[in-house]
Image: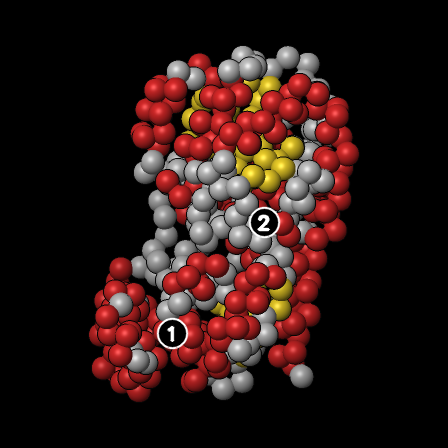
Amino acid sequence: MKVGIVIMQFPAPSETFASNDIKEISRRIDEAHVFTMRPNTEFHRELICQRQLESISIYSIRLKEFVIGSMLLLFYIRHVSYLMRCIFCNLASFFRMESYKQICLIPISIIQYRKIKALNLDLVHLFWGHYPSLIGLLVKRYCSGTKVSVFVGAYDLELSLSCSRKMLSVCDFVLTHSDGNSNKISSLYNRTANVIYRGVDLERLGTLSTRNGTDNEDNKIHISTCSRLIKEKGVDDVLRCISKVLSQFDNVFLTVIGDGPDRSRLEKLVRDLGIAEHVIFKGHLSHDLVLKNIADSDIFLFLSRYGGERLPNVIKEAMALGTICVSSRTTDIHELIQDNSTGFLVDIGDYETAAKHITNVIAHGAAAQKEKVNNAKLHIRNNFSVRASIEKTLQIWQKVDE
């Protein structure tokens, strides 16, 4: 099978899961080609090497191609006209800023569509269901014999682009990664979505796993959190939680992994809370170093309040590594963490209850959490393997030959 995958950027620093998925797809099929809609990051070559993606064909967008695509619009009037009708499908769409963003992406869509058509692919998969839908619509309409599959995530549902709605009405396969998303897709678009959880690389994680409900020899409690440093991710609640825990246990240390525009505010909050000696900001790390830091932690704390959060891969990895997880109740998180069985859940913004769970774990010792740790590992192994997830995806795509 020859498959093209349309994604905004590849590899993206914050999307290790995309690299894992696409690498596994590439390993299992005849040909896999990746088409991006944004230019490469400054870390492109470094990420290619770190994530072992050298064998994957990546068709990235460059500035000169955007210019060429703009010039080609005159020769693709039918295609442009079709996309414009999809974008401005009703009166409300004329008043949405996103409609005009879609227009700006038409030249890029034409360029990538031309490459896809030349390769005569069996299937094109839209890794995200928002702006990549522009390319998907062109493929579905003008590439006879090429099926189109689209993944619909929480952000896609919230953004609800006109091109996405059209894509969902004409595509061959719809995928999503939580039951909650599937129910929304069914009610909003009258489409049945195949629920396939995004998986993690269990073999790789198995080589790093160092915790199994055992106590620390250095008498320090190591807690980690990992996310992009933006307000929606709730890292400020993590810091307030740690401040509460430190009022009872002074041997607690927090590692903050990740970077972003909210970092300076968070560093100031650390100073204001008087916990600077107990918090270290490590910034952006390679995926291997992220996993090592989580594996060396007693507790992983994730208090996101982001509305688009769905079953974060970093929590899956922490659970697989045997690190006790405390998470906010983001949408559908119960599909990943069963409260008080495979970890702990607290209401969004309730860092005080999170602190109580952590102090309870510390007071009773990590060994007392051994059952939760083992339950969490088993749950991840049974439901969130990247190999099993891609196998299910390929079984759906095999219908391309039927």
Image x and y of residue 316, in percent: 62, 44
Query: Looking at the rendering, which quadrant does residue 401 occupy?
Result: bottom right
Residue 190 in sight here? yes
Circle 2: is it few (<14), some (14-19), or many (20+) Cα within 10 Å? many
Circle 1: is it few (<14), some (14-19), or many (20+) Cα within 10 Å? many
Residue 24 in sight here? no
- As displayed, is residue 194 above or below residue 8? below
Dot 2 amino acid type: Ile
Residue that numbered label 2 is attached to: 333
Dot 1 amino acid type: Cys
In the rendered image, the quadrant that contains the C terminus is bottom right
Left or right of residue 63, residue 35 in this image? right
Q: Residue at x 65, y 32 (%)?
A: 323
Cβ atoms at labels 2 and 1 below 8 Å apart? no
- As displayed, is residue 147 above or below residue 341? below
- Comparing 353 with 215, the one in front is 353
Please tell me how many numbered marks the rendered image carries: 2
Q: Earlier in the sequence, mark 2 or mark 1?
A: 1
Residue that numbered label 1 is attached to: 163
- Comparing 135 with 325, the one in front is 325
Q: Residue at x 49, y 27 (%)?
A: 241
